[in-house]
Image (cartoon, helix red, strand yellow):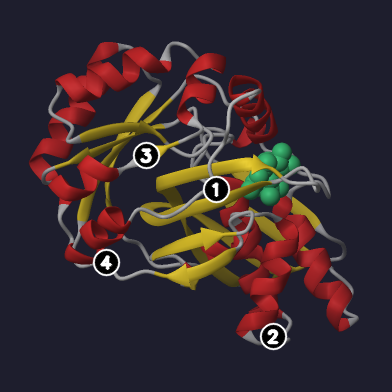
Amino acid sequence: METVRVRVPAKVNVQLAVGGVRPDGFHDLANVFLAVGLYDEVTATPADTLRVTCAGPDAAAVPLDRTNLAARAALALAGRYGIEPDVHLHIDKDIPVAGGMAGGSADAAGALVACDALWGTDAPRDELLAICAELGSDVPFSLVGGAALGTGRGERLRPLDVGGTFHWVFAVADGGLSTPAVYGEFDRLTAGLRVPGPAASRDLLDALAKGDATALAATVSNDLQPAALSLFPPLTGTLATGRDAGALAALVSGSGPTTAFLAADADAAAEIARALMASGTCRTARATTAPAPGATVV
Ligand code: C5P
């Protein structure tokens, strides 16, 4: 095979319940992931040595060395199968960088699936998922897509039923947030408080299963939101703009700074996106739908 191209979705966390910090420094989560229709594409081509390139509006912010999660995914698979990781990974990046939408995780899952096909390793699904979990807490979900409840540090997945199409708008902020910094701010804001054990909301899972946007809007939550707003105060204005434009719910996506707006239908989403773009409270706004499939060879 000469070239393999894999498409991988972004995610929003419709519930992100964060527990206390664990001895390993991670936080226990009840993390309800929903894959959304913004995609990165990873193309794997045989090469003399491991090489990463990236194209897209945010490409300059993407590291191209072996710290890139896509490169680390190729190295992990090659290491397991005793293969030389001589591959050119090209990332067509449409998912906001450092935006709380698992763009780096998407690239890792995409590279893993692409290299598995290119090298003919044909690794079992469970092994791919185990490699994903080593690479990062959100990477397994980028592989599977759809909707899933992530427990542990977010890497242990249970697939969830989704009974319809949800309409979303994502406002991309000017700048990024570091996930460890946001968790650190969460720790600072909750210091001395009793942090309850994280649990998925039954009402939220029901709303997802029914495809009921109004019910979902009433139950979405993100425990990292106060920390993200503390580190990136202008997001408060972005959230208010989307709410004023008719969003059923407005929240920070994961660790931010992308903000997510649930809309009643496609027309409402277009109107929210238009209002956000006109407001000057974000860099750009994108309307899309969910759920989206996981990493897929195209
Ligand atoms: O797993 P991943 O590499 O994506 O995590 C990035 C950082 O986010 C971790 O180093 C940690 O600071 C924080 N994190 C956490 N608890 C989680 C997931 C991530 O504290 N469950």
The residue shown at (18%, 32%) is 247
Q: Let me know if residue 227 appears in the view.
A: yes
Alpha carbons under labels 1 and 4: distance apart: 25 Å
Residue depicted at x 67% and y 38%: 62
Distance in Å between CA atoms under marks 2 and 1: 35 Å
Q: Is residue 273 left or right of residue 123?
A: left
Look at the numbered disc 4 and give the secondary structure of its residue: loop
Question: x and y percent of residue 7 in the render?
Answer: 48, 63
Crowd around label 3: few <14 · some 14–19 · many ≥20 (10 Å): many
The percent position of residue 162, horizontal first and vertical second, equals 27, 66
Ligand 1's quadrant: top right
Give whichever of discs 2 and 3 has the lower sequence position: 2
Residue at image mark 1:
197
Q: Where is residue 296 in the image (x, y as percent from the top left)?
A: 48, 72
Question: Marks 4 and 1: in contact by CB < 8 Å?
Answer: no
Disc 2 residue type? Ala
How many residues crowd mark 2 within 10 Å: few (<14), some (14–19), many (20+)?
A: some
SS at badge 2: loop
In the visual, does 250 lie left or right of 33?
Answer: left
Q: Residue tagged by mark 2?
A: 123
| Of the image marks 1 and 3, the number of the one nearer the N terminus | 1
Counting residues from the start of the chain, the first of labels 4 and 3 encountered is: 4
- In the image, 259 versus 298, the foreground residue is 259
| Mark whose residue sits in front, 4 or 3 | 3
Residue type marked 1: Gly
